[in-house]
Amino acid sequence: MTELQAALRKAVRGEVRFDVTARALTTMDASNYRRVPLGVVAPRDADDVAAVLEVCREHGVPVVARGGGTSIAGQATGTGVVLDFTRHMNRMVTLDPEARTAVVQPGLVLDRLQEAAAPHGLRFGPDPSTHSRCTLGGMIGNNSCGSHSVAWGTTADSVRELDVVTARGERLRLGQEWAGAPQGLRALVKGELARLRTGFPELPRRISGYALDALLPEKGADVARSFCGSEGTLGILTEAVVGLVEAPRARALAVLGYADEGAAAEAAAGLLPHHPLTVEGMAADLVPADAVGLPRGGAWLFVETGGDTEGEARARAEAIVRAADVVDALVVTDAGGQRALWRIREDASGTATRMPDGSEAWPGWEDCAVPPARLGAYLRDFRGLLTSHGLRGTPYGHFGDGCIHVRIDFDLLTETGIARFRRFSEELAEVVVAHGGSLSGEHGDGQARAELLPKMYGDELVDLFSRVKGVWDPDDLLNPGMLVRPAPLDANLRFAVLPREPVDVAFGYPSDGGDFSAAVRRCVGVAKCRTTSVTGSAVMCPSFRATGDETHSTRGRARLLHEMLAGEVVTDGWRSEEVRDALDLCLSCKGCRSDCPVEVDMATYKAEFLHHHYAGRRRPAAHYSMGRLPVWLRWVDRTRTAPIVNALASVRPLAWVAKRLGGIAPERGIPRVATRTLSRWLRRRLRKRVRTWRDELRAGGRPGIPETSAFLWPDTFTDHLSPEVGRAAVKVLEAAGIGVMEPPTRPWRVHRFADGGIQGVSVPSPIGRRRSRVCCGLTYISTGQLDRARAVLRHTLDLMEPFLLPELEEAEQTPVVVLEPSCAAALRTDLPELLHDDPRAARLAARVLTFAEALERLAPDWTPPRLDRPVTGQTHCHQHAVLGDAPDRRVRAAAGLTGELSGGCCGLAGNFGFERGHYEVSVACAEDQLLPAVRESPADAVVLADGFSCRTQLEQVGGVRGRHLAEVLAEGLEGQ
């Protein structure tokens, strides 16, 4: 391997990586399979590709071309050298609007081509659900299709010419009339014309095998078209000329509701004469519980129509609704509404990896296709076969093309389950063939189905595939084991290397049965985290968008954790420096918890890893300085030294020393510490209120004690660094009729009878007892100090004990209002997952309300002050991922605060942006969404930022003061 690496470094100008991280990142694609490569090369151009092939041929090492790594059949993995085209060969070379063509490199992401074509009224026809991260090279290799194939066909229908380097270094320009055909191919085909004319089923989604019928003279002897779908086994693509289609000026989306998937499948083919752009189907099993906007039904068809005007598109959609026998229907013409509905369908590829009960489901029979008219009958047989094997799956997909996607709850962890997987695969192949179908209708055969191609094509035609492979690649150098002489479909399964016994971990992983391996298995590789732009309030994955490096994507980190558990590539377990370095740029934004279709929670995995990695070892300085921030700030408060600390921090040499010792980025300013904390202000205020109430009682009056009360959580950031936010919140909450209390600062004692009933509660004497604070443990969790976090959280539960008793009726349960979104998220999710053995944790989590939630639930009749101003800023990443921002939107609307907040992450993310070495990435994250949104906002816009980190980033990097919603509303109250 050393000799191979040296030879490649000498011959190639691009990156040559044989390190642990590079290999671990490419062991898997989005399939069930795993193969460990020797190394990864990111070529800069076709010369580099030719050089790699020459070196690998000399060393007898196979080569695998890889795009976005979203292949579902295993063809983007290999044991030799992997070519990564996404790093350098990712450009759109030219675009000719008049000819309606574009010249692209294989690593170009589809969405980038669509963005370039859109200003000319054009688009690339095929559009898989992975359009935001799949590459044109991968689409050509798989002959990908997407939802619009009923109108614009497969990728092969859009290919004009291809530049290819063969395994022996020959450079060919493939096209029609035998253009670019390697020597011997024409003669081979000429002797098999009869077989080619009769051996291939006619259906729109025939992707399996080699498309040799494209070489027939009556089909133009199109070598480029025949190359599509060859999965990198014939040659390496270096450039492509692709055709573009005219995009409709207006679109409408008809969503048709049916009783069940069978009815939807039966109806799909009947809609094709209306020339729709899409006929997509899915059942209720795959629809998220919080999804809105779908018409009534148990299954739906998403039928898109186009036109020159909105009225024309709508008229065509309404004509389809009238022609369809539906339970209910909906026609949407506004772009936002269509995007929201399409997102439900596109996320099905990830949602389907979990059954409704949360159990795992896997690809393998992801995209079989049958003639559309036979889809209903095929689905009935498919369901019957599932039942006979005791398996479950939820079909969805391209009903108009007869192509069905499905994830099935195969047991791929035991010998018995794997044997059932093989039997089912063999029997299902026979069912597909009996219906005149193709084993693959979109994603290719790969390792998942190539072994079964004789069932579809027969031995003689499969032998012809082998001979064609021999003409193109006589040394079997390119992606061996795929399509021709395939590896068994039950070999190289990626789960085989994982530990069979649960790993000892700190978090409870309730959605994964407490099994960390199962949590890591959640990542199936659909790579939504590799999206380079976000829409709406989406967050995931800011570090990937900032770096463009797979290592710093959610998928990349999950792959490294998978290999850490496997112990083959990453060999030092929790002590792995490769895993640590990959997690280092994770902002713990939790965006993946909501934006990833399978809800990977990398922030939790990072905390878990850091907990084990530094167990019994010295930690980075930042873990002591910022991870234990609550300790230091409470010490400053107790000693009343905030003025001294602030004065010292303003002296540059002293600040430099402090930042150096604390592991803080030198570019950062140290936030000022409040001279009077929110807690002190609340206690002083309460004493005044009690005296007032006492005087009112003595005077014979009725004290003005609010009927509704809530605890105001004194989180570290609000309490010590921005108490003005807390004071504003108190003003607004009380104006809404909500009484505000400080959580207990000393543990109360609950006295019980022998039978467990409550006898009473006693408050300890304050004499000789120091006050303590409730704390969400956020800073300890984010730095992986989980033992300390557990201790802090248990103490918090002890303080809150009297208010968390299970005997309390709902009306007696005091809500807890948390102003800092990250602290609210920690209490709502991290607390019960870290203290999964303490029932009080779930009860406290259920009491947590954000500021806007408190106004809605506790004061539903209150009307906020009317402000009538535009807003800008960013939805806090934890708010988006864990808490939801619907109440905030409604409160803003009621106050006349108009406009949308951006998505993404501010980049400061608690301690992340303050840590040494993170400043550049932190700023890049801010420049992704937040700062551009603020710069482009109207001059009178209110800059909203509920998180302390967001406000700090705005001030230090953008020179702008952001405000909490509570501050804005409080200011409005003053003007009334």
Image (cartoon, rainbow, N blue to C red):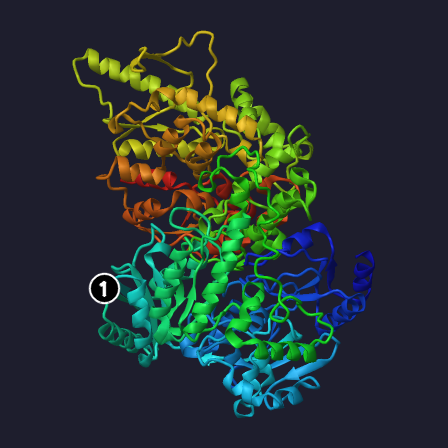
Please identify the quadrant where the C terminus is shown.
top left
Please identify the quadrant where the N terminus is shown.
bottom right
Q: Position of residue 632 (x, y in %)?
A: 57, 25
Question: From this viewpoint, is residue 130 visible?
Answer: no
Query: Which quarter of the picture shows residue 760?
Result: top left
Residue under label 1: 328
Q: Position of residue 419 (x, y in %)?
A: 53, 54
- When the figure is inspected, residue 607 is found, relative to residue 639, above or below; the finding is below
Query: Which quarter of the picture shows residue 787?
Result: top right
- Say how many tags the image has: 1
- When the figure is inspected, residue 70 is found, relative to residue 961, above or below; the finding is below
* Residue sitting nearer the eye, 943 or 916: 916
- When the figure is inspected, residue 627 is found, relative to residue 122, above or below; the finding is above
Q: Position of residue 685 (x, y in %)?
A: 35, 21
* Residue sitting nearer the eye, 70 or 881: 70
* Residue sitting nearer the eye, 103 or 310: 103
Query: Which quarter of the picture shows residue 184?
Result: bottom right
Left or right of 776: which side holds 73? right
The residue type indicated by label 1 comes to Asp
Helix or strand or loop: what does disc 1 sit on? Answer: strand
